[in-house]
Amino acid sequence: MFEFFLKGGLLMWPILLCSIISFCIILERFYFFYKTRERIPNFSNQIKNLLNQNKIDEALKLCEITKGIIPNILGIAIHIRKKSQETKDRILKKYVSKTLRNLEKNLNILAVIGNIAPLLGLLGTITGMIRAFMKIHQLRGSAGVSDIAGGIWEALITTAFGLLVAIPTIAFYHYFEIKVNNILDEIKESVSDISEDENSPSGQERVEK
C-alpha cells in the first residue's frame, strides 16, 4: 500500500496531510456537537412553562444543571430579563456571536481543504503527464508503455487521492453548516418565545414582582 502511495509522487504528501487535518477536524466537530446536544426533549417548552407558572428560580436551576447551548443562552436570557430591551439585545447578540464562533470553529479549514485537495490532485496529474512526455522526448519518440508508466501512475493516483479527500471533506463541511444553522434557528426561536412571554401582561407582572 505504501509503495502504491509513493507512486503518486511528492504531491501525495500534502494530500495526505490534508486528509489527516480533515479527519481530525471532523472527529472534533462530531465530539463538540455530541457534547452540546439537547439532552432534555422539548427543553425550551419546559422553561417556558416554568416561567408561565412564575417559577423563575426553578427555570434558572434547570438551565444551570443542564449542559448544552440552548440551556446556557436561555439561562442568560432569564438572568437579564429585568433589563431594558436594548441591553438585553446587546448582551444576547454578544453571546450568540460567541456561540456562533464556537459552532463554526475550524469549518473554514474544511472548506479550504475541500478546495485545495482536488487542485493538488490536478497538479499531480499535470506533473505526471509532464514526466511522461519528458520520457517520450528523451527516448526520441521510441518510448514504450513501461517507460511512461511512472508518469501515468503519478497522474492518475494523485487525482484519485485528491478527490477521495475532497469529496467527504466537502460533504461533512455542508453537514456541519446545516447543523449550525439549525442550532441558530432553535436559539432564535427559544429566545423569542421567552421574550414574548416576558412582554405579555402576565410576564410583565412577574417581572415587576
Image (cartoon, rainbow, N blue to C red):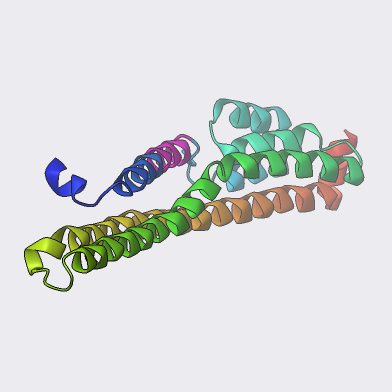
Report the residue at 63% width, 34% height from top. Answer: 72
* 139 in magenta: no
Number of on-image labels: 0
Q: Nearer the viewer, residue 44 or 2?
A: 2
Q: Nearer the viewer, residue 27 or 37?
A: 27
Image side of residue 2 versus residue 16, left or right: left
Q: In the rendered view of the protein, which quadrant contains the C terminus?
A: top right
Image side of residue 114 versus residue 156, left or right: right
Q: Nearer the viewer, residue 141 or 195?
A: 141
Magenta stretch, main secondary structure class: helix
Q: In the rendered view of the protein, which quadrant contains the N terminus?
A: top left
Residue 23 rendering spot, x and y as whole percentages: 35, 42
Residue 57 in sight: yes
Report the residue at 84% width, 42% height from top. Answer: 90
Residue 195 rendering spot, x and y as whole percentages: 78, 49
Report the residue at 45% width, 51% height from top. Answer: 113
Residue 180 rendering spot, x and y as whole percentages: 55, 51
Q: Nearer the viewer, residue 92 or 108?
A: 108
Q: Residue 204 sits in which quadrant?
A: top right
Image side of residue 141 versus residue 108, left or right: left
Report the residue at 52% width, 55% height from top. Answer: 177
| In the depicted structure, whether residue 121 falls above or below residue 140 | above
Residue 129 rendering spot, x and y as whole percentages: 27, 66
Q: Residue 103 sits in which quadrant?
A: top right
Residue 53 in sight: no
* The magenta segment: 24-35
